[in-house]
Amino acid sequence: MSNLLRKPQDVVKSEGVTIVHDITGERSNLEYVGFKVVDLEKGSLYRGQLDNLECCIVALTGKVDINVEEETFENLGTRDSVFERKPTDSVYVSNDRSFQVKAITGARVALCYSPSQEQLPTKLIKADSIEAEHRGKYNNQRKVHNILPDSDPSANSLLVVEVYTESGNWSSYPPHKHDQDNLPEESFLEETYYHEMDPQQGFVFQRVYTDDRSLDETMTAGNGDVVVVPKGYHPVGVPDGYTSYYLNVMAGPVRKWKFNNDEDHEWIVNRD
Ligand SMILES: O=C(O)C[C@@H](O)[C@H](O)C(=O)CO
């Protein structure tokens, strides 16, 4: 299996707490992005200590209370399934802080990490502050929730976004890349994709490739899989009959999302 495609690990950490994915440190092969998915049974507690990392906690499904040292944010989370297609609540936590996530109902949270030195305020990102953005046309349509975009200065490195792609459509398309630390032309951002499908037996195809094709892998991602994108173009194709959801985490040396499309496919965006 590709090293870029990560299947759910489902490691029980403590009573009621299951680590579905842990793509951090040596497990990630990435320098700037770390990612975890944690399942919590009702009443269970996950504790995190951030040293030189910042973290965006996304309440993917279910209801949680999140405590960050002296602050507590109660009753976060807006949906039982990501396919309710509505934004959810998140909390940004800066480096050198500790946090706790307590499950009020059964819940799944995403923990999105990046290295960070300069401490910033903790920030509650409420669902109702996120406007759905519609992108693309024809079979290239998708709906985007910008959770932590580069226009929001709340984080040092992290960018977080969730994307819905309906049946038979393509997203992260035409293929684009952001793997050169060469602003203003392009930024270097590593990226992870956490995928879900509706219905769950669905799948998507994701290709990760560079111009010189020294990296060129096409993967079949299933419900709950993560695809790691260290560099290169990374389009996603969704088969007929299935809806795709993914959560992207991006980070790099400069917190700017400046991408370039694959020139061969640039015409896709220029259609009338
Ligand atoms: O617009 C999309 O299709 C989503 C992508 O931009 C996705 O968030 C990504 O690839 C970011 O680099």
Image (cartoon, helix red, strand yellow):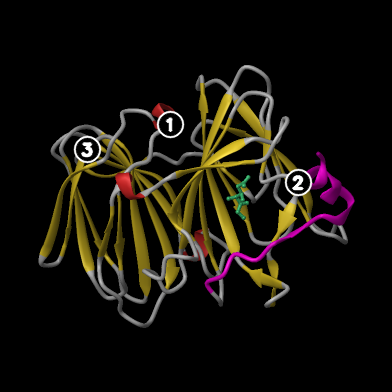
- The residue pinned by badge 2 equals 174
Tags 2 and 1 touching, CB below 8 Å: no
Secondary structure type for disc 1? loop
Query: In this figure, which residue is indicated by the disc labeled 3?
Result: 63
Label 1 crowd bin: few (<14), some (14–19), many (20+), radius 10 Å: some
Residue type marked 2: Pro
Nearest to the observer: residue 182 or residue 217: 182
Mark 3: C-beta under 8 Å from nearest atom of ligand 1: no
- Where residue 195 sits in the image (x, y, percent)? 53, 38
Q: Say if disc 1 is inside 8 Å of ligand 1.
A: no
Residue that carries the numbered disc 1 in the rendered image: 85
Magenta segment range? 255-272
Dot 2 falls on a residue whose secondary structure is: loop
Where is residue 102? Give x, y as percent.
17, 46
* Membership of 114 in magenta stretch: no
The Cα atoms of the two marked residues, 1 and 3, are separated by 16 Å
For label 3, the crowd category at 10 Å Cα-Cα, with few meaning under 14, some 14 to 19 and many 20 or more, is many
Q: Please give the label number shown on residue 151.
A: none
Amino acid found under the numbered disc labelled 1: Arg
At 27% from the left and 76% from the top, the residue drawn is: 96
- Quadrant in which the N terminus appears: top right
Check disc 3 and give the amino acid type. Lys
167 shown above or below 195: above
Q: Earlier in the sequence, mark 2 or mark 1?
A: 1
Look at the numbered disc 3 and give the secondary structure of its residue: loop
Query: Residue 265's spot in the image, x, y percent?
Result: 85, 48
Using the numbered discs, state the Cα–Cα distance from disc 3 to disc 2 in whole angstroms: 36 Å
- Taking the spot 39% from the left edge, 34% from the top edge, the residue there is 86
